[in-house]
Amino acid sequence: MTPKIARFLVEQQPATPCLVLDLDRVEANFRAIRNALPLAQIYYAVKANPARPVLERLVRLDSRFDAAGFEEIAACLAVGARPDAISFGNTIKKAIAIRRAHAAGVTLYAFDSAEELEKLAANAPGARVYCRILVGNEGADWPLSRKFGTSVAMAKELMLRAGELGLDPYGLSFHVGSQQTTPRAYELAIGKVAMLFTDLTEAGVNLRMMNLGGGFPTRYRDAVPEIDRFGDAIMAAMTGHFGNALPEMLIEPGRSVVGDAGLVEAEVVLVSRRDRDDPVRWVYLDIGRFGGLAETEGEAIKYRITTPHDGTELGPVSIAGPTCDGADIMYERSNYRLPLALRTGDRVELLSAGAYVSTYASQGFNGFAPLAEHYL
Ligand SMILES: *Cc1c(COP(=O)(O)O)cnc(C)c1O
């Protein structure tokens, strides 16, 4: 928790649940990423937290933006981002969204299939396009599975086809999975994609760019490697493959920019036991899976939790949300332990909740309002 957030919580006692985020920490994170990879252009992945104050701060730092839909593009333009600093990075786009982006001056688009390429040629003629390659997501706590990306062989055909369609075959991309905790994952992915890059260049395609995606981790319950370790691994792999002829490098960090800049302030609604002798207490908070904590699915993301009784004796707990849905359980198997003194009405903090929380909150399921947000 940053001093600014601590002061806000004491002085304002905001109604819970709410997200409180320190924009200075966003800036510090952005600068740390830029220092770790000074040769890369940073395209902030807007979906991690699209709040206007976050985008405004990042525009001031000359960030570029990775957007998933036209609404995100519009949000970036509204805070003064230049259209040529926006990448339309979703490989699954409606034709109308492509047309609108093209009309707004966006010139850079992702794809991973023949049909999407045809759509781009029809609705954003002449655009710079990059093909997303499917790479391993091992080591990622929130993998992106096989939903995106194509094989090296098909990517080669598609990039050759892009030129025939009048598009500019600009580069290749990958994503090693979100909350990726092993720098080695980037080395392996770069190895795979760099070979295709060289292959296409030799086939006469004027490729200029490698997009290394996002995935850089933020600290939750367990420690993660520093951003510099990822920067070093990436630069070693890139120079290993390209020597002095490095292509333009893009990265699309989301979680690592905003994650540890924010926390969720929540209240304990109930502490109960299934049986008098059951050692495990159930702790129900006023936020759960439907209030924004979607990444607790499968107990994938494990938030650090602080309470007013920290430092006193702990006991095992299961932790759940306040709705009447049986899926609204955050942690049952991850060995969470909270103070035995914890009671109804206590305020608790879920740390590093600045990414992938506010926009995951439901629109009034069970009558619970969407998550309140405070940007400091
Ligand atoms: C979600 C996403 C990102 C951001 O990933 P993080 O793990 O939050 O850094 C980057 N690029 C693309 C294409 C994405 O879909």
Image: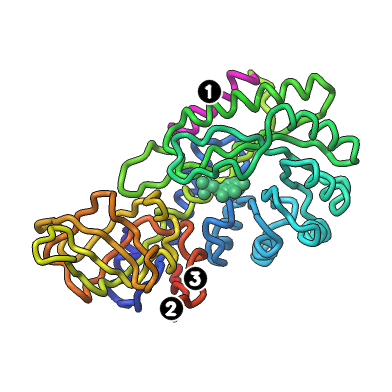
| Res 344 quadrant in image | bottom left
Dot in front, 2 or 1 = 2
Give coordinates of residue 138: x percent, y percent.
47, 34
Which residue is depicted at the point 65% across and 61% down?
Answer: 72
Which residue is depicted at the point 88% across and 51% down?
Answer: 122
- Over which residues does the magenta segment extend? 227-242
290 sits to left or right of 333: right
Give coordinates of residue 68: x percent, y percent.
65, 55
Which circle's residue, 2 or 1, is located before the other in the chain?
Answer: 1
Instruction: Provide the residue designation for mark 3.
Output: 362
Label 1 to label 3: alpha-carbon separation: 43 Å
User: Would you say the magenta stretch is mainly helix, strand or loop?
Assistant: helix
Instruction: Provide the residue designation for mark 1.
Output: 236
Q: Amino acid at mark 3?
A: Ser
35 sits to left or right of 93: left
Give coordinates of residue 229: x percent, y percent.
43, 32
Q: Is residue 332 positioned above or below 362 on the image?
A: above
